[in-house]
Image (cartoon, coloured by chain):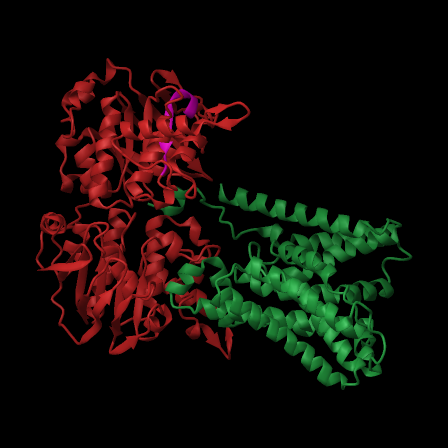
Amino acid sequence: MTTDIESGRGKRPRRSFGLARYSGLYIWALLIALFAVWLPDTFPTTQTLRSVADDQAVTCLVALALVVPIAAGIFDLSVAAQLGFSLVIAVYLQSQGIHPVISVLVALASGLLVGVLNAIVVVKLSVDSFIATLGMSSILAAGVYTVTDGQPIVNGISEGFTQAGRGTLLGVPLTVVYLAVVAAVLWYVMEYTPLGRHFYATGGNPQAARLTGLRVDRITAYAFILSGLLASIAGVVLAAKLGSGSHLAGPPYLLPAFSAAFLGATQIKPGRVNVLGTLVAVYLLATGVKGLQLAGAPPEINDLFNGVALIAAVALAARSARRARS
Amino acid sequence: MSDSQHPGAEAAVPTAASAGVASSVVPALDVVGLSKTFDGTQVLTDIRFDVLPGEVHALVGENGSGKSTTVKILAGVYDPDDGGAVTVAGTALDLSDPSASDAAGLRFVHQDLGLVAALDARDNLALGQGYDTGWPWRIRWRSEGAAAREALDRLGYDIDVTQPVSTLSISERTAIAIARALSPRRETPAVVVLDEPTANLPESEVRRLAASIRRLSAAGIGVLFISHHFEEVFDLADRVTVLRDGKVVTTRPVAELDHGSLVELMTGRTLDVDHVAQPQSELRDVVLATSGLNGAVVRDLDLTVAGGEVVGVAGITGSGREEVARLVAGDLSPESGEVVVAGRRIAAGRPDLCKAAGMSYVPAERKTNGIVTGHSVAENVVIADLRPLRRRGALRARLQRRDADAWIERLDVRPRDGGLPIESLSGGNQQKVVLARALRLSPTVLVLDEPTQGVDVGAQAQIRSHIRAAVAEGLGVLVCSSSSEELAEMCDRVVVMVGGRRVRDMVAPMEVDEITAATLQSVAEGTA
């Protein structure tokens, strides 16, 4: 009497994704090889490498801010608005003559605060996370506009602050260094601490998690707070990189970040949104876009490529999951 | 076999004629030489049985015996190996075509029923057969309502067809699923396949459903009935086909069998279910106490469970029995009253505090409350306590594997592979995983809600023997169950709930019928 026979899943359990698990890495390598052969003069250069890595660091940080709530089974649509909010706070305070370190700390604190507010609305007031964070996005947009008065802030930004956004360390752009540090810490938290496992368990079945004695409410709150903190880090990094603050900076990051998180959920640990998969997703997409742009494709190739890749990857993952099950 | 053999309430007495006349009557369903191989593993070997018009034919077997695979082949989900044949009312079925079985007159009612919970009976019936519409695409609600009421009336159910089905009882929902299978706007089916329709039904509702199944057979429809519940098999079926390890052991008129011989045929061994001696464990301190507990139904419940004791809660649906475990374990917040676990008073609605005080909880409805979906078996075993899996602050995959493997081995979870997704296990094995998670916490008190619901006989016996072993070591157990058989077998004491109140206590040894009688008899007293 073997149970797997009854269910018909037999010898092909879903976890043995084999190639699919790392398909992103293979495709990435393939893309690099392809463009290197096609555009030997412009593509395989340190210049390209550095610009791709640097350009995508902020998108990566926002996507990582989404990894935590999605793992815990909730949405945080306010990450991009939080990025914009902490960005303008960091810049505005400096323009008012406040020390850049304090400005940065206040900007990070604003992210924590927004996370706490999201948590209160969702956990205490029992508002669906999608709706709560949608509302929060709108509120933050109003806040950003109030701070900037609709005008870009360009004066009074500390030299050291912009240097921290544009400099390099041993040839590596500092934004990439920040990303590496944040990603490493988050990866450890998600994979090697009980908190990370509790996020995933809560996302898997909140009712079962609660009945097994996990404090699901608290775990949900942590997810929002962590997400808020990560989004505000992204905001500060972007502020340093741009050296200015605009009310238009945040919102464009929302969709690419969601795309990356969902695309990342098909990689490394298929079926689960995860840190490494998200990094692979962002850089896979960026490499493709960069190559096409260097080959002379028009600027709209960016959005087109991202959209097609997301849908294709998730559809393929769904297909292989279905196959593994039947 | 004629309709006249199915009068009214009593199940028809099957006769040797059922088998004898099989050759002269065209069977409603005839299965010959069905085999199935998955990746080189033969799971079905030469399955053959037939269902006569108007016959209720039970298909029984332990989990993994091949029942589900057989049903899935009939439903066109799997292709069988070459050589098998299925005929429906004399017409050969094209087994490679998934829509063929439906067209040929085979209808299925699956265990999950496949209803849309937020919609009402009219919608759910129409989703199977299409809406009755006027111009322009306007749904004729009045005629839909009348049709739905009539279809349900034929099954003996009087249901408000405008209520969302989520507000209905499980047997009412099952009736809607059966009504949809019968689909008045299409031809009358030759055979209705009921795949464990009663797995989650309390006994009183089983009776209602049984009556409607008899109506089907009285109308000349063959019924293939897959069940874990022997009472229903003996109550309803004319003949029984027993599967074991993917083979037909026998097909016999039910009258030739009794409980013991059926268990023996299913398991291939004698299973002393009813007469396991209760280990005389020493009673220790009170580990769980409730006082004046009030819930939505439960009224002023006082309960105590001592270490080394198994206390049962019996009661029909609506008696408050379903609520007791959830109130005690902190799933629901009581309106008033308190729960004390190992001397510690627990704040309302806090399963985490219950756990901290030494309580483990195995909730009912494993799919929604028990298993953590999208996670592996091993992760499900260990999730309640990750502390032992840390070395220098970080969780270690190796420690998790070792820890989980030990529990998988101990509770005989099959297959023995902690890396498999939890959803790939059968219901009985999933339940063992949930129990492993609970026992792994080394609790002082274990609260079980319908612990062997939808679990086959062999796994039930295993689950109970593990609980018994833990009890012998001083664990206190509270078990709430709709199965009198289970309570009689497991418990030292049983508390009978009626109308939200504890009306009667029973002490082992108890007879199954005594407990059932107590839950029902008292209803009559309560309403009188």
Image quadrant assignment for residue A63 = bottom right
Is residue B31 rendered magenta in the image? no
Image position, residue B162 (x, y; %):
38, 37
Return the x and y of residue A29 as percentages of the image width and height. 74, 55
Q: Quadrant of residue B71?
A: top left
The answer to whether residue A206 is visible is yes
Q: Quadrant of the N terminus of chain B?
A: top left
Query: x, y percentage for residue A238?
Result: 76, 70
Q: Name the outermost residue toward the top.
A: B24
User: Which chain is represented by red in the image?
Assistant: B
Span of residues in magenta? B102-110
Asked if residue B105 lies in the magenta stretch, the reply is yes
Give me the residue at 36% from left, 46% from top: A2
**Is residue B256 shown above or below B334?**
above
Which chain is tinted green?
A
Position of B187 compared to B221: left or right?
right
Task: Please tell me in which quadrant of the rendered image residue B448 appears.
Answer: bottom left
The correct choice, above or below, for B487 with respect to B207 in the image is below
Q: Nearer the viewer, residue B442 or B105?
A: B105
Tell me how many marks there are: 0
Query: Is residue A183 visible to the viewer in this orientation of the structure?
Result: no
A7, A12: nearer the viewer? A7
The x, y position of residue B291, in whole percent, is: 20, 71
- Viewer-closest of A25 and B196: B196
* Side (left or right) of B528 relative to A55: left
